[in-house]
Amino acid sequence: MTISGSWQRTARGAGLLAPDGRIASTIFAEMSSLAQATGAINLGQGFPDEDGPAEVLDAARRAIADGVNQYPPGTGIPALRQAIAEHQQRFYGLRVDPDREVLVTAGATEALAATILALVDDGDEVVTLEPFYDAYGGLISLARGIHKTVPLRRPDFLPDHDELRAAVTDRTRVILINTPHNPTGTVLPRETLELIVELAHEHDAIIVTDEVYEHLTFGYPHIPVAALPGARERTVTISSAGKTFSTTGWKIGWIVSTPELVTAVLAVKQFLTYVNGAPFQPAIALGLALPDSFYDGIAATLQAKRDLLSQGLVKAGFDVTVPHGTYFVVADAAPLGYADAATLCRELPALAGVVGVPISAFCHEEVGQEYASLVRFAFCKKVDVLERAAAQLAQLARLGR
Ligand SMILES: *Cc1c(COP(=O)(O)O)cnc(C)c1O
């Protein structure tokens, strides 16, 4: 039997299907099983190894006990939509109508999927930064869009403004950005965001902005695109509770946009999951209303973890780019004698008992070369785990390759 649907096309395009039709293992899966097989510390996958705020976890338990276990409303429970609107006002001064401008989704992933499927037609171009979060490539090809990228240039991983101008044309339907940026840790500066808004107007494109790390920045303020003049009416803002509250398994995300765009996205979303996470929704509503001390606390804790791991990587001999946000740090293995980060990542469990992911996993094959010696390490792990990882990595310097 020949199977040829959207998934097969996407999977082949994204290199997920082997020639024999079986699902090829991704470097993420390969590295995670390597960590398991060797007992190495897994800094490859980006999920926290500690629970988030107890009051948020308790609220979910209470909701289950109270019988909040059936389908919630299609757009999300009113209390959560209200909390999202209040969050946008409190942190960014944005006035949002919780009934018409907010949509709760099954994580940022469903928000991205529904938005791209709603907005992108066969042959429409979608411009993203590169490296890019892996789901972007798959979703653009599911929508039969054409994926164009603008490279983030070293040493700061910022896009060149001329390259950005050249990438956006009248064929561009969506400019999909991610700030703070996974995997580089870049926080896009105001000038770049202003240019993106200008280009979106000039070419009548829609801005989709993935801001799941909005609260994880280290002295560099996160600027939501929607807060810039002229941006709001053509921007879909996507965020999620997973990273902020260390609840990546709950899959509570959301969209904030105009009533017209929310309706367009809802039209697709209703046939993806319809709804999800009934007892988690009131818990996240409570979380979003936590005092500033919570938000300051998570950023400060994470910054200390960033510094701890970065020091270990520097001692090991990597060239480290200190991230301004997210919980990832990019380290260049070239000074260690590794031109190919994938090779280092395969050897690293034996050499230092640590697992990372090559940045090429977040790139198209053709441009991966530029980032060939870079590795992403996650630092959303317990302090003692990071201390051990840093000490083990420091041993690498003695190998003197
Ligand atoms: C983790 C992540 C997501 C997915 O968020 P979920 O809420 O778990 O679906 C989306 N975008 C980026 C950049 C991420 O790092």
Image (cartoon, helix red, strand yellow):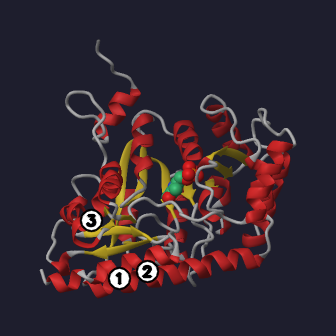
Provide residue 272's location: percent of width, then percent of height: 60, 32
Residue assigned mark 3: 349
Residue assigned mark 2: 387
Quarter of the C terminus within the rendering: bottom left
Provide residue 155's location: percent of width, then percent of height: 32, 80
The relative height of residue 207 versus residue 124 in the rendered view (above or below) is below
| Cα distance between the residues tagged 2 and 1 | 6 Å
| Cα distance between the residues tagged 3 and 2 | 16 Å
Q: Earlier in the sequence, mark 3 or mark 2?
A: 3
* 10 Å crowding of disc 3: few (<14), some (14-19), many (20+): many
In this orientation, does residue 185 appear?
yes
Q: Is the residue marked 3 within 8 Å of ligand 1, measured from its CB?
A: no
- SS assignment at label 1: helix
Quarter of the N terminus within the rendering: top left
In this orientation, does residue 206 appear?
no
Q: Earlier in the sequence, mark 3 or mark 1?
A: 3
Answer with left or right where residue 337 lies relative to residue 159.
left
**Label for residue 391?**
1
